[in-house]
Amino acid sequence: MKSVKQEGKVVKGSSQEIADMLADEKKKLMEPGAHNIIIYNDLKAFREIYSQYSRALLTENEIVVIASQYDTTSDVRNTLRLAGVDIEKYLNQGTLFIIDAQHGYQQDADNSGIWKLCQSLISRAGKEDRRGVTFIGDLGSFFNFEKIEELMQYELSLPQKYEDTLKGICCYHSEDFENLSETQQQTLFDHHFKSIWVK
Amino acid sequence: MSKNPAGNNTDKQLAKLLVVDDDSDIVQVLKRGLLKNGFTVNAFSKPQEALQSFKSNAESYCLVLSDIRMPGLSGMQLARKVKEINPNVKVVLMTAFEIRDDEFSKVFPSTSVDGFVQKPIGIKDLTDKILSLIRDSKRRTNED
């Protein structure tokens, strides 16, 4: 962990280091209610992070939602299997949701589809005595469709800190994120609880 | 090169393709397969570099084959940019996801794409599709 740098809200590390930190509750990187942002530099790093973090969460009775933009849902399933996740078990018991981020974010005019899903799952988590809900979502579709203003409106409409049963990570490929102006980038950093950079 | 029942070797030899996919493994497989089938191919895993190559040699490319979902510059954005530079170039977009035509027409209404391909696709089927578009383009040029 020596190469991991944490200065205030900013955390930088390799994909393995970040994955380990996310899964380690003592590190408080993903404390209850956290609404964080991750900037990843390649898909392999992103896969390592979401697969290892999800594996840890699912074994802790958490509901996990993965919304991937550049991997198909089949790819995500395979990645999770390779990480040792019994995906059939969690899919069947309804604690794992794998969705196409583009469809999730862009099917509604106000981009609220995924948010509504998370809200309904929070309610379910309470009824089923689950620990909570963690959402890992890639915002790349906003760039694919050139909806930058909508992206900013959507992100800023979400609270900086959620209620305690929800944790969320807004994920950006660095090549998408770099298409934002410096002001927009800083606005997003300021708005999220912690900013995580994958080296 | 063995005779290809799919068609005329001259068409392929004259056909320069630009292939783009952010997955470098897929790019290499496509490049190898299309080269083996007689095409001239430039392949990139970074769409911005592909666009630069196109800008430098716009008239020499007859077809662009690109993945749709790529970080930094999507296939649809690339299609729009190459068509602005050379309206005669054919563009075929590939995706492993479900193809929803209405998604693109709403956001990119003025960008025409000449074909969509669902991944995975065999090289033979891809070659046939590319050749049919090249021949169609040649036929229209001869008619004009």
Image: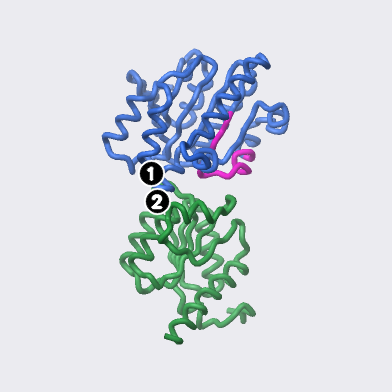
Q: Which residue is at 43% across, 52% downward?
A: B107
Residue on which the image places disc 2: B73
Which amino acid lies under the numbered mark 2 shown in the image of this protein?
Leu
State the SS at label 2: loop
Identify the residue shown where x is 39% and y is 43%.
A147
Mark 2 Cα shell of 10 Å, populated few (<14), some (14-19), many (≥20): many
User: Are the residues flagged by discs 2 and 1 in contact, CB closer than 8 Å?
Assistant: yes
Quadrant holding the N terminus of chain A: top left
User: In the image, which residues are magenta?
Assistant: A65-78
**In the figure, what tint was chain B given?**
green
The C terminus of chain A: image quadrant: top left
Q: Chain of mark 1?
A: A
Residue in the foreground of this view, choosing between A77 and B30: A77
Q: Position of residue A161 (x, y in %)?
A: 43, 18
Is A85 positioned to the left or the right of A139 in the image?
Answer: right
Query: Where in the figure is residue A57, as x and y percent of width and height?
Result: 59, 22
Q: Which residue is nearer to you in this view: A182 or A150? A: A150
**What residue sits right under mark 1 in the picture?**
A175
Above/below status of B70 relative to A132: below
Please tell me whether residue A69 belongs to the stretch shown in magenta.
Answer: yes
In the rendered image, the vertical position of residue A41 relative to residue B113, given as above or below: above
Q: Dot 1, how many residues are within 10 Å of its Cα: few (below 14), some (14-19), or many (20+)? A: some
Picture quadrant where residue B131 is located:
bottom right
Residue A21 located left or right of residue A5: right
Residues tagged by mark 2 and mark 1 found on one chain of the structure: no
Q: Is residue B60 a member of the stretch shown in magenta?
A: no
Nearest to viewer (mark 2 / mark 1): 2
* Residue A71 location (% of width, % of height): 55, 44
Chain letter belonging to callout 2: B
Q: Indicate the amino acid at tag 1.
A: Glu
Please identify which colour was used for chain A in the image: blue
